[in-house]
Image: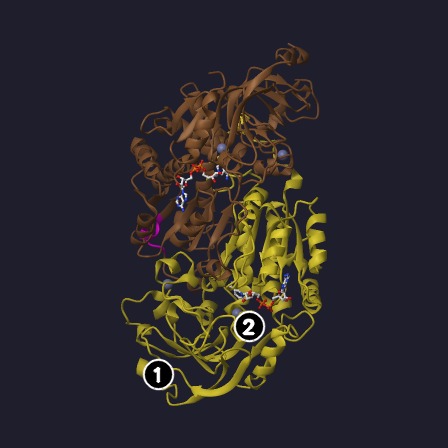
Chain colours: A yellow, B brown
Amino acid sequence: MSVSDEKAALDVSGIQKAVRWYPPKYDIRVEAVPIPQIIDPDDAIVKVKLAGLCGSDLHIYRGHEDVDADLTCGHELIGEVVALGPSFRPDATGRPELYSTLKVGDKVVSPFTVSCGECHFCRIGFTCRCIHSCLFGIPTLPGGQAQYARIPKAGGTLFNLSSLQSSSGSGEQPWDLSKLSDSSLLLLADILPTGVFAAMQALQHPKIAPILTGKPYPYGGFVPSSPVGQAQASTALQEGDKLLTIGIVGLGPVGVCATVSLLDILAGLGASQGLQYQVIAIDPIESRRTKMEAVYNAIDVSGKGSGRFAVASIEDGKKLASGWTNGAGCNAVLEVVGNNSALTLAYDIVRPFGIISSVGVHQEPPIPFTGRDVYNKNVSFDFGRCPVRAMFPIALEILLKRQDVFGGVGKEASLIDRIVSFDEAPQVYEDFDKGRCGKILFDPWR
Amino acid sequence: MSVSDEKAALDVSGIQKAVRWYPPKYDIRVEAVPIPQIIDPDDAIVKVKLAGLCGSDLHIYRGHEDVDADLTCGHELIGEVVALGPSFRPDATGRPELYSTLKVGDKVVSPFTVSCGECHFCRIGFTCRCIHSCLFGIPTLPGGQAQYARIPKAGGTLFNLSSLQSSSGSGEQPWDLSKLSDSSLLLLADILPTGVFAAMQALQHPKIAPILTGKPYPYGGFVPSSPVGQAQASTALQEGDKLLTIGIVGLGPVGVCATVSLLDILAGLGASQGLQYQVIAIDPIESRRTKMEAVYNAIDVSGKGSGRFAVASIEDGKKLASGWTNGAGCNAVLEVVGNNSALTLAYDIVRPFGIISSVGVHQEPPIPFTGRDVYNKNVSFDFGRCPVRAMFPIALEILLKRQDVFGGVGKEASLIDRIVSFDEAPQVYEDFDKGRCGKILFDPWR
Ligand SMILES: NC(=O)c1ccc[n+]([C@@H]2O[C@H](COP(=O)([O-])OP(=O)(O)OC[C@H]3O[C@@H](n4cnc5c(N)ncnc54)[C@H](O)[C@@H]3O)[C@@H](O)[C@H]2O)c1
Ligand SMILES: NC(=O)c1ccc[n+]([C@@H]2O[C@H](COP(=O)([O-])OP(=O)(O)OC[C@H]3O[C@@H](n4cnc5c(N)ncnc54)[C@H](O)[C@@H]3O)[C@@H](O)[C@H]2O)c1
Ligand SMILES: [Zn+2]
Ligand SMILES: [Zn+2]
Ligand SMILES: [Zn+2]
Ligand SMILES: [Zn+2]
């Protein structure tokens, strides 16, 4: 089939259903809009199988993002490639292999931002800050809560599940994706990689290295070796020093993903490096805590090892962070909320030389710390957007292991509450905004 | 000589000269005060040979620290142990080896804070946040600008140069300290380790790892290996990706130390890993820039490799940070000032996924960023106090290599401007505060 045939496979004159938002806020409508067309040689058109509703959609929904034009919502989708621009021909020149290997019919997940796969930022893995970066679900780039979506720079942007089946994972085992439901694969579009990112930012920080490596700061990093004798600052590390206490602030869908990912990595580090851990997962909303507890109970021992774990309200979380650490506080805190009360809580429960790994999307207000606060605690912060495209493989490995949590829909321990039709969009946006439900997916064809 | 003899060696009834500060601000007096005595078994009394005047002294001098009692100034000293508490007897029990090896007569440098060498924070190298941490030069712990100083937890706190002579450095070479002047060793008390710390925080950050290792994020850290094939997010790294652009904001004595340390480490990474670098050193004061240029010119090629280096005003620095990086900005910025204008400049010139390594001592004002600022750039921050005691060995290796810069006094390329008597204290505090001089040391016996 030639490229023009492929394009022809899509009814270019058609219209489709989409979930649309109107300014200034809270105005969700289901509308008929034109099916998107290829407008750049690097574009793909994807027929959407499932689209997610996400905490990040709420920032626009609530009118916090200063958007003044209507838009097609959503930035999480899984689907099938139905048309490709000319850059994807096998004989196209000047495009990297990622482009020539994408085919019509491939099953794909799209991360929530465009990434070309070619620029310096993409090459070093900071895909969400690609020089061509663009967020789905803004007025200039219609989102995934539609029957079809246009994906710019599709060779770099899309995660090609079909070609992955025949490829191999880490440890050179072939990836077996057959047991994965579409609803669980949809989580790769954003929230699972973002959860992994939150955990990894904390655990890879050089201030954590002494606990993991048993070498005192600053020798855990690239500095060759520790000079001996009196050059030492202290007595040797003791067995009890290999204890990490980590807080998670916010147990929405992303916070649950962060917690599951963190436990998985900590269990691995415990097995390989003798690490002990204590994890404190905090949310003020009881239903969110109940979900987190059910998810935790569903994880088998290989995914959580033998550390200490608690789900707590804000007040209880503060008490545990102090009580479990002789008053020192957490080595790291994952902030998965996106407001200043969460950042303040993270600061309160972090210890000196601790890390705040913040993936919450923060808005206009100044961040709530004085210079003295941050100096006096030697705090490290990592802020910002997850480079989802770069985190896919690690997230996929966790997804494969954690079908107990991510596989089902609507069960007590399922992260995903329901799969609904677009007609329910106004209602589920409102419910999700009020914390009355967990993760919701849309089936555009229902 | 028994411990009581040792104590007797010091005239306990004597008085000494000291530089003292009176609230609310700018009030420096040279006074006669009692010689400090051993009051805790872990104390040492050190006879001060040289004491430093430092940018950190200016925070108290200017009345920014809310101190309302008079105090003996200073937190940088080199000297000789003249008395030790009972914990240091060879037969004392319950104290680590660092205590039993310290002797009367040993030549020592004290970091600017107390660290016991025993607690968890000390063991993992975060010595400046020791559970017994205390800053020298506050009302409750008289500082080093005196003829004698009491050093709490002296086994952990003091860096013992005498015992180091007979010990070995990295690469198992014995340390040869004979060519080091006391004035250069004094820099180990604070500003050289702090400069190294500023550089290392940036270079050891996982967001720099892709540039150093050639592996895309997040695989530079402890994550085992990169899954292959379509799991990749992008094309492979290219030769040109191994380029680091680093800004230094503030060229006071600490900023110069940070720059020299950074260049030394970058030269090493260039030699071992083929790294290219660009360094932009920024200060609004011309005399500070002139000093930085002279220092740079004095460094031989082994200490700076073949990267690109510029000293710049604020405006020129902004232009270079953009011009040298196709508008992307610096991979990391070292903030070595301690005010919000410097933090704002650091943010302006850092690129997405960049790091701000802040060692400036910040005060009451809120840090000057909105949530959107930090989210949108994926900025990482490291704030706080240098764990000087843990950084000593690395700083000492740089000091040994960089006698061209740190060895002399009063020459064009010398970091240290003058060694003066206490009588000049009121004048040099004023001059240093106004940026009219560089690093000044006091000789308490002059
Ligand atoms: N960095 C990224 O790339 C990225 C990607 C996806 C989502 N996000 C962001 O992650 C955040 C979480 O997403 P979500 O879908 O889970 O959102 P959500 O709104 O469903 O969940 C947020 C949770 O935080 C809790 N919370 C509120 N204030 C709190 C406080 N002070 N302490 C503890 N918990 C508190 C709420 O009760 C709620 O359960 C959002 O800001 C979202 O935009 C960021
Ligand atoms: N973190 C630590 O452990 C530690 C240790 C020692 C010193 N310090 C702090 O490091 C800082 C620097 O110390 P110093 O002795 O070099 O101080 P200094 O006052 O001599 O030098 C500061 C320099 O910053 C410059 N400057 C001011 N505003 C600037 C701006 N917006 N952009 C660029 N440069 C600007 C000034 O012109 C000056 O040359 C101080 O805050 C000091 O307290 C911290
Ligand atoms: Zn999302
Ligand atoms: Zn790109
Ligand atoms: Zn100092
Ligand atoms: Zn200690």
The segment highlighted magenta reads B237-244
Q: Is residue B223 left or right of residue B434?
A: right
Residue drawn at point x = 27 percent, y = 68 percent: A93
Q: Which of the two discs, 2 and 1, sits closer to the camera? A: 2
Residue drawn at point x = 52 percent, y = 70 percent: A64
Q: Quadrant of ligand 2?
A: top left
The quarter of the picture where the C terminus of chain A appears is bottom right
> Which amino acid lies under the numbered mark 1 shown in the image of this protein?
Lys
Residue identified by numbered label 1 = A7
C-alpha separation, residue under disc 2 versus residue under disc 1: 34 Å
- Is any atom of residue A62 visible in this view? yes
x, y percentage for residue B413? 32, 29
x, y percentage for residue A54? 55, 72
Please, what secondary structure does the residue beneath circle 2 have?
helix
Q: Is residue B282 magenta?
A: no
The answer for which chain carries disc 2 is A
Quarter assignment of residue B322: bottom left
How packed mark 1 is, by other alpha carbons closer than 10 Å (few <14, some 14-19, many 20 or more), is many
The quarter of the picture where the N terminus of chain A appears is bottom left
Q: Earlier in the sequence, mark 2 or mark 1?
A: 1
Residue drawn at point x = 53 percent, y = 38 percent: B63
Labels in figure, total: 2
Residue identified by numbered label 2 = A58
